[in-house]
Image (cartoon, rainbow, N blue to C red):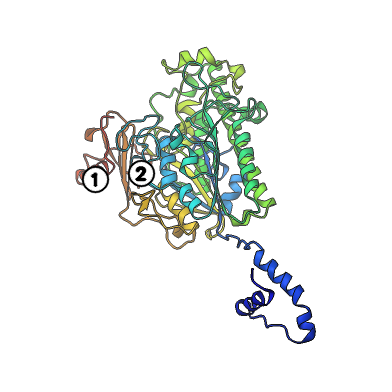
Amino acid sequence: MKTGRQIWIKLKKDAGIPLPSGYWGWQMLPVLFSFAVSCQNAPERQVPDTRPNILLLVADDLGYSDLGSFGGEIPTPNLDRLAASGVRFSRFHTAPMCAPTRAMLLSGNDNHIAGVGRQAAQFDVFGYEGYLTDRVATVPELLRESGYATMMAGKWHLGGFPEANPRAKGFDRSFVLLEGVGNHFNNAGIFGDGSESHYTENGRTAQWPAGQYSTDFYTEKLLGYLEENHGTGKPFFAYAAFTAPHWPLQVASAHWKKFEPDYRDGYEALRKRRLAGLKREGLIAADSSLPLFHPDIPAWDSLTAEEKERETRKMAIYAGMVENLDLNIGRILEYLESTGEFENTLILFLSDNGAAGEDYFSNPEIRPYINSYYSDDTDRMGEPDSFISYGPPWAEAATGPFRYFKGYTTRGGILAPLIVSGPGVTSLNAIAPAITTVMDIAPTLFSAGGISYPKKWKGSEVYPLRGASLWPVLTDAAESPHPDDYVFAMEHAQYGMVQKGRWKIANTQRPLNRSRFELYDLGTDPGEQHDLKDEAPEIFSEMMDAWEDYAREVRLQLPE
């Protein structure tokens, strides 16, 4: 052990403190010695990490125009507040279904490169593994390695086995639904002979607490994880992957009964109001018009009184789920304000695809299961034992001037709301019309955390990011994160698309082949109504060349 004089000499050398002199100086040496020893033995003081916290909020199947700040009538004051203090992206593209979107979101890469070329399918084939592969380094992995506390609550849908669990992909804390859909009130499975949904917490099997509502419970979990981290000096990456407002449409009646009067005039009337709302908010051009309805949608006036009542209630319950979602997001924002962390938290909110057009009442394969394990009685709608979805009519009301809905690579299926707000965002209450994609989120978060994407991860080479950081747009440094010749291509379940500038090719029929692609000029035809491939064959050929390049790069498998 060092003597007091040796310690003091070290203090003199390290801190410039002079040696004691005179009688009283040396009489004080024992006291100074005790002080020096305590300094030597004291734990090293932790310097707080001043990088921003990151809060990623994802809604499931939320429509493009559902939020008040995106022209909707449903009360969403908390999300509207974020929009007013940040940037709304009016041409933000996702995948047409949730699992590929989540793979792109957490990787910054194409869904095939990440490993989720097809939702709910796992094959030992490049691009179709059904989970996040080691070809990519995930957002939570890199943030955690750099010192962030990482946590999530909600829907995972990126692999159900241990090596694919959030615990193995970078999350310190997590409570997740492994499948893509679950009952909002209990553990009852949605598909498959009365099976149960599967949950894990921190990688271990967990049970859903019966009676808890999904959005409320996921919020509670995330708040608990945030409280655990509070005071540690570590910034956090919190991912709230809500399962609302995904079907089955379920929520307490206190949230939805008040909305029934708003929808009694039907989905055609709502569609017109949403179009007007989008124009009012400046998210679409003033001369935008509505495309034709999907051919399977009946006219509202052709429905019976009973059918109108059922349809009205579906939409009212959906609106109640969205209101409840906004209220819970408000709880998270309130917590951050109470802890003094709000001002240093970058917040991103998005939906994972276009509005959901699934109609399981009309599906002959699934309807028998619904009848066996769930009720579809009008009086039971919204209850835990009720299974309903709102189908194509209301979905197309939510997509406004864009064609079709979830599942398609037309704009109605892949345009979603995105709001970014928080430290560093200097463009306030702004609308960004640039073409952006869900692959741009990861580079944005890496930039916020001061992280460089690696060339190797876990001992293997990884594919470079396909997305680009949104910070130039968020700070008014540029109108777009991408160059003028940027090409965005996408494929899922044999629906494909390529967009370059104002031109786009896409198909709405399967199987996917060259003859089924159509060419649209989005500058004059945002609703993708007029196929121009015969009128502009050179442009169509150029776009098809881009498609072939993309297909080779991601090793597309057709037919799947």
Q: Is residue 127 above or below residue 232?
A: above
Residue closest to the eye, 97 or 451: 451
Under tag 2, what secondary structure? loop
- Residue found at x 60% / y 34%: 215
Q: Nearer the observer, disc 2 or disc 1?
A: 2
Residue 415: horizontal and vertical position, in percent?
43, 41
Q: Amino acid at mark 1?
A: Asp
C-alpha separation, residue under disc 2 versus residue under disc 1: 14 Å
Residue 551: horizontal and vertical position, in percent?
26, 41
- Residue found at x 49% / y 46%: 418
Residue closest to the eye, 12 or 535: 12
Q: Which residue is mark 1?
A: 549
Tell me the number on the disc at residue 451.
none
Q: Residue furthest bottom?
A: 22
Q: Quadrant of the N terminus?
A: bottom right
Under tag 1, what secondary structure? helix
Tell me the number on the disc at residue 110.
2
Residue 40: horizontal and vertical position, in percent?
65, 67
Horizontal side of 339 relative to 106 (left or right) equals right
Q: Is residue 435 above or below residue 315?
A: below
**Category of crowding for the residue at label 1, using alpha-carbon neighbours closer than 10 angstroms: few (below 14), some (14–19), many (at least 20):** few
User: Which one is earlier in the sequence, the residue at label 2 or at label 1?
Assistant: 2
Determine if residue 402 is in view.
Answer: no
Q: Amino acid at mark 2?
A: Asp
Q: Quadrant of the C terminus?
A: top left
Determine if residue 554 is in view.
Answer: yes
